[in-house]
Image (spheres, grey):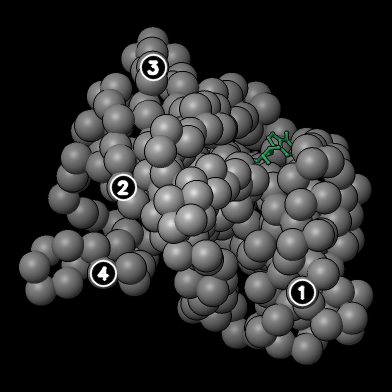
């Protein structure tokens, strides 16, 4: 009898978005950081937050939870991701909070949405825009879509090992306590155009797995390339937020604007483009 129960448990299936969210998303931490950047750069508070490339729009849901005058706009091409977010996240907000979240199934390049104080792009999705012309068009559109004073903010992955193909594995605990292996595979890197292919795989239990649950083909933009295009699109200032160290020299999860740093094997920074008209 005991053996049977164990088999049922190990055969449990999980939705790929549930696995992804547990492995790579932290909406409370991310919104706190983004809000901190806005407060550091403007003397008023942000109200309207737009999450581009939002997938299941966890950050947009978190934004309306933290203040009653907050509104959010979530944009993604994929109707399945938006439907999952509505079913599993928006439905857990109270009805007043739900009224303050709008979703748009649209391409970020031509979405027509109300103006925002913040446009945020998470988990390296800026890399989906793989050529300079497209990146400039997108940043120019974001500049127009922001309020008179506003901020575009996104994370960027780099470092002198970012071109190395490799696999990285770590354990993730799901809400039911199940431990899942999360594997981040850097499968290809082309130094001629700095385009790269990544895959996310999951495995758990006895041979259960989702290989290539997600695959991404991204341009690995450098910080100066990105800063130049932001300024060309009209942003008056560009800040680069680098992670601070703890006493052992490891990243401590807080970020400060920096102009000069020591390079390292792999880094993740936040870049903020500031519109100050
Ligand atoms: C890496 S996921 C990012 C998910 C989420 N932002 C996060 O923090 O984890 C990328 C998402 O971008 C969406 N996407 C890709 N290109 C897009 C485009 N041009 N317009 C809108 N959404 C796009 C995909 O459908 C996918 O849901």
- Quarter residue 111 falls in: top right
Secondary element at image label 2: strand
Q: Report which residue position mark 4 lands on.
A: 252
Would you name the residue on which mark 3 appears? Answer: 188
Q: Is the residue marked by circle 4 packed among few (<14), some (14-19), or many (20+) residues within 10 Å?
A: few
Give the CA distance from mark 2 to mark 4: 19 Å
Measured Cα–Cα span from mark 1 to mark 3: 39 Å
Q: Position of residue 204 (x, y in %)?
A: 42, 43
Q: CA distance from mark 4 to mark 1?
A: 31 Å
Q: Is label 2's Cβ within 8 Å of ligand 1?
A: no
* Residue shown at the point (60%, 84%) measured from the top left: 43
Residue 170 vertical position relative to residue 221 in the rendered view, above or below:
below
Residue found 24% across the figure and 63% down from its top: 251
What is the distance, in whole Å, between disc 2 and disc 1 at their CAs?
29 Å
Where does label 1 land, which residue? 92
Task: Give the numbered dot on residue 170.
Answer: 2
Residue 102 vs 77, above or below: the answer is: below
On the image, the x and y values in percent for residue 242 come to 32, 59
Does label 4 or label 1 sit earlier along the sequence?
A: 1
Q: Name the N-terminal-most of marks 1 and 3.
A: 1
Which quadrant does ligand 1 occupy?
Answer: top right
Q: Secondary structure at mark 3?
A: strand
| Tag nearer the camera, 1 or 3 | 1
Q: Residue at x 37, y 29 (%)?
A: 185
Earlier residue among tags 2 and 4:
2
């Amino acid at each position: 009898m005991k053996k049977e129960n164990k088999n049922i448990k190990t055969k449990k299936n999980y939705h790929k978005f549930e696995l992804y969210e547990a492995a790579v998303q932290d909406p409370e931490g991310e919104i706190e950081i983004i809000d901190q950047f806005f407060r550091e750069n403007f003397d008023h508070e942000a109200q309207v937050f737009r999450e581009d490339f939002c997938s299941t729009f966890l950050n947009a849901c978190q934004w309306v939870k933290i203040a009653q005058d907050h509104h959010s706009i979530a944009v993604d091409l994929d109707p399945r991701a938006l439907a999952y977010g509505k079913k599993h996240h928006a439905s857990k907000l109270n009805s007043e909070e739900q009224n303050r979240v709008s979703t748009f199934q649209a391409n970020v390049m031509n979405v027509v949405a109300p103006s925002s104080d913040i446009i945020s792009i998470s988990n390296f999705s800026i890399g989906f825009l793989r050529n300079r012309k497209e990146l400039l068009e997108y940043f120019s559109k974001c500049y127009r879509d922001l309020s008179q004073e506003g901020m575009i903010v996104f994370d960027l992955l780099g470092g002198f090992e970012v071109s190395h193909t490799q696999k990285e594995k770590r354990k993730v605990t799901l809400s039911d306590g199940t431990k899942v292996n999360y594997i981040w595979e850097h499968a290809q890197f082309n130094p001629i155009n700095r385009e790269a292919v990544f895959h996310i795989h999951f495995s758990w239990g006895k041979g259960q797995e989702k290989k290539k649950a997600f695959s991404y083909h991204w341009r690995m933009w450098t910080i100066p390339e990105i800063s130049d295009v932001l300024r060309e699109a009209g942003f008056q200032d560009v800040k680069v937020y680098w992670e601070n160290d703890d006493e052992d020299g490891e990243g401590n999860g807080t970020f400060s604007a920096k102009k000069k740093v020591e390079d390292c094997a792999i880094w993740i920074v936040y870049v903020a483009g500031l519109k100050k008209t």
